Amino acid sequence: MLDVFSFNHFLWLLFIPIVIYFVYYGLNNKSQKFKYWFLFSLTLVAWVVHFSRYWLDPEFSTYKLFFVDLCGFSTMLYPFFFLSKKKVLKDTMYYSGALFAFLSLVYPNTIEGDPIFIYNTIRFFLAHIILMMVPILLAAWKLHIPNIKNLGWVFVFIMIGGLYNMALTSFFVEVGLRNSLINYMGIWGHEGTLYSYALIIVPWMTYDRLVEGEIVKTAIPYLYIIPAAFIVLMPTWLLMSLPVVGVKEFKTKINDIIKRL
């Protein structure tokens, strides 16, 4: 069984950098054109893996056919972002897609307790490895160099992803695919989620809700996560920039940003 932070989970995590390492060095001598289309093909593989759940996942629910949660949102958009000439979209793949895929792999609560070698577990790891590997190799092979000047737009993308998640979960309930809202990204502010820690930063962003005859203070959906997400993500993204941008260029870009403020 795949228990979070168990030995089996650790082996899966160890497998991830090994795969990326061997793909990087195995194709490093290929032409830039070959590498480009190889990585693009991976974004299509992610789509195939996603939709194959309809036939191969014995516990498949119809609503899962949608690209749910932020990683699903990224999977849906990766092929279009990849082909776009807008560099900010590839920055989004690196800073948002790769980071949240990594976090999902570190804490795969959606498949916790599942057998290791069933389709859904393998699908989960394969899909999230692709989300990580594509932007990392884009940067490693110098096909795209992330630009910290676009971090503001990356944050906007994540906020749009949050609204997308809210719309989907509401839609599922409205059409009867589910009888309760799914708390993707902690959007709805339900208790018992990791994102409840966001209220430490904005404790006033709550409202009173009647639960079983008692008034309970609940986080205002969506809005309460924005300040915490900004405070946590910005330093994280700056650290992610160092390996691919270089210290000297990193300092120059930081100074440019400060001068514009």
Image: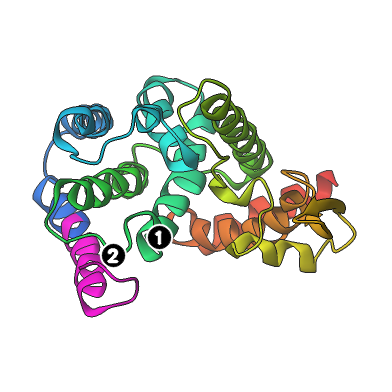
The residue lying toward the viewer, choosing from 68 and 113, is: 113
- Residue 167: x %, y % from top left: 61, 27
- Between disc 1 and disc 2, the foreground one is 2
Does residue 38 lie above or below 130 as drawn?
above
Q: Main secondary structure of the magenta part?
A: helix
- Residue 249: x %, y % from top left: 56, 55
* Three-letter code, disc 1: Asn
Q: Which disc, if any, is residue 128?
A: none
The colouring scheme, among rainbow, by chain, secondary structure or one colour, is rainbow
The residue lying toward the viewer, choosing from 216 and 128, is: 216
Q: Which quarter of the figure has residue 107?
A: bottom left
Residue occupying the far right of the picture: 204
Q: Quadrant of the N terminus?
A: bottom left
Q: How many marks?
A: 2
- Residue 196: x %, y % from top left: 68, 63
Q: Residues within 10 Å of mark 2 (few under 14, many from 20)?
A: few
Residue drawn at x 68%, y 54% is 229
Give me the C-alpha separation between circle 1 and circle 2. 9 Å
* Three-letter code, disc 2: Gly
Task: Say what secondary structure mark 1 lies in.
Answer: helix
**Which residues fall within the magenta stretch?**
1-19
Residue on which the image places disc 2: 113
The residue lying toward the viewer, choosing from 99 and 144, is: 99
Q: Is residue 14 magenta?
A: yes
Residue occupying the far bottom of the picture: 7
Q: Is residue 50 left or right of residue 160?
A: left
Q: Residues within 10 Å of mark 1 (few under 14, many from 20)?
A: few
Q: Which quarter of the figure has residue 88?
A: top right
Q: Which disc, if any, is residue 109?
A: 1
Q: Is residue 161 visible?
A: yes
